[in-house]
Image (cartoon, rainbow, N blue to C red):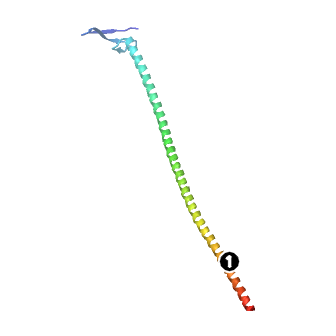
Amino acid sequence: LYCIVVRFHNIKMNGDVERGVFFDEEYQIRILEVDKFNLSKGLQDNTNIFITNVQQLTALVEKYLSQIDQQVERIEAEKLRAVGLRNRVAALEEERRRKRKEQERLIGEKQEELERLMTEEQSLIKVKQEQELLISKLSDSSSGAAFD
């Protein structure tokens, strides 16, 4: 492994800094030393792996959120269906109550009519009995008068 180093010397305010141009084992020109380049390359590889993992995590989270959204839509649809059914049941109960009140009202009317008719029947029976008694008295008095 040969490394040809061309060094440039720059002086900064804070001290002597050594910079140069380096050649690696494949004779590629490098600005960093081979060790620092390898460390940088390793960091870049790890960063790329990290980015890939973050992208996979993002895709997984998006898939999870999509499934959650689908579940939310299903739940909302079921909630709407349940509310509709509850409203329908309430409407049916109200209809049943209304019909029951109507039937009770009709029964009350029929009861009143029955009582009226029964009273009328009793009255007519009484009138019939009185008339039969009167007829009987008249026929008794007319049959007795014919023999007198």
Q: Position of residue 74 (x, y in %)?
A: 50, 42
Q: Please tell me which residue lies in front, 90 or 138.
A: 138
Residue at 53%, 54% in the rendered image: 94
Question: Mark 1 packing: few (<14 Cα in 10 Å), some, or many (20+)?
Answer: few
Give, as a three-letter code, the residue at label 1.
Answer: Gln
Q: Please tell me which residue lies in front, 75 or 101.
A: 101
Relative to residue 1, is residue 99 drawn left or right? right
Q: Which part of the image, by quadrant, shows the N terminus?
A: top left
Q: Examine the rendered structure and indicate whether residue 147 appears above or below residue 12.
A: below
What residue occupies the far front of the structure in this picture? 148
Residue at 48%, 39% in the rendered image: 72
Q: Please tell me which residue lies in front, 53 or 116.
A: 116
Relative to residue 128, is residue 19 drawn left or right? left
Can you tell which quarter of the image residue 43 is in?
A: top left
Q: Position of residue 80 (x, y in %)?
A: 49, 46
What residue occupies the far left of the structure in this picture? 13
Can you tell which quarter of the image residue 36 is in?
A: top left
Q: Which part of the image, by quadrant, shows the C terminus?
A: bottom right
Judging from the image, what secondary structure is the residue with disc 1 in? helix
Q: Position of residue 26 (x, y in %)?
A: 40, 14
Can you tell which quarter of the image residue 101 is in?
A: bottom right
Q: Examine the rendered structure and indicate whether residue 62 appears above or below residue 48.
A: below
Residue at 44%, 28% in the rendered image: 55
Disc 1 target residue? 129
Q: Examine the rendered structure and indicate whether residue 124 appears above or below residue 9.
A: below
Residue at 72%, 85% in the rendered image: 140
Q: Please tell me which residue lies in front, 103 or 70.
A: 103
Q: Position of residue 48 (x, y in %)?
A: 42, 22
Q: Examine the rendered structure and indicate whether residue 131 appears above or below residue 41.
A: below
